[in-house]
Image (cartoon, rainbow, N blue to C red):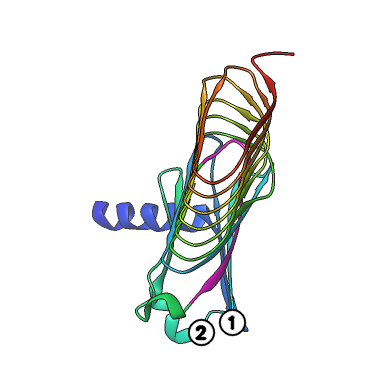
Amino acid sequence: MKTRNIILALITVLLVNIVSYGYDNGDLTKSFKVNKGGKLDININSGSINLTPWEKNEVYVKVDNVDKDRLNDIEIYLEGNNVYVKYNSKWGWGEEIDLYVSFPSQFSVEAKSTGGDINVKGNVVGNIELNTMGGDVTLKNVKGKVRVSTQGGDLRVGDIEGALSLSTMGGDINIGEVIGETAKVNTMGGDIKVSKAMSGIEAVTYGGEITVKVLGGD
């Protein structure tokens, strides 16, 4: 009897945390109740990642244009206060997905894609780590540590209050204002443009120009 009660309690917890789950006309959706201060962890081997912070205590995940025979390649689940999204196509790079996630603005994010753009379309309070092998990365304002790298695209970053590290093998880097530790920026084949670096900047380019409008203050 006691074992049965424990099982029922666990099922109840799972149902409370999962707000919704659905698959309709090729679109997979899933959402979870969370608290501020958690983490969104994304790892997909092919496709674009589109992230939107909001003020709800909920993570909403949508995957567009997914065939039924690929549903087993996608994992979306909650563990503690962290949400994980994983996609590992058995056919490799040819099976791209378009991923859309809305998450609390006070959340940390780690997102990786081997073949697509990563876009964060709002302000975040938390640590951010983004990596793509073949696309552009766009990030707005962040209060927290930021580490972004791409092997073949441009980086566009807004205002950062915290440690900043950016790296691209073949694109331009554009940054707003950086407050906090010395920013570290590197590109192998493009320009670097910074609006303001309050604590200095270590910038390296092997094939472009470096422009910093304001360095170390007003």
Mark number, residue 26 = 1
Image coordinates of residue 117 in percent, x first then y, are 57, 60
Does residue 79 appear in the picture of this structure?
A: yes
Residue occupied by mark 2: 67
Q: Which residues are magenta?
A: 96-108
Secondary structure at numbered mark 2: loop
Q: Residue at x 45, y 80 (%)?
A: 94
- Horizontal relation, residue 59 to residue 134: left or right: right
Image coordinates of residue 99 in percent, x first then y, are 57, 65
Residue at the farthest right position: 218
Q: Residue at x 54, y 33 (%)?
A: 126
Q: Which amino acid lies under the numbered mark 2 shown in the image of this protein?
A: Asp
Instruction: Give residue 76's quadrant in the image.
Output: bottom left
Q: Are marks 1 and 2 in contact (CB under 8 Å)?
A: yes
Q: Nearer the viewer, residue 211 or 158?
A: 211
**Neighbours of disc 1 within 10 Å: few (<14), some (14-19), many (20+):** few
Q: Which amino acid lies under the numbered mark 1 shown in the image of this protein?
A: Gly
Does residue 129 appear in the picture of this structure?
A: no
Q: Is residue 73 magenta?
A: no
Q: Give the vertical position of 120 relative to 214 (above or below).
A: below
Secondary structure at numbered mark 1: loop
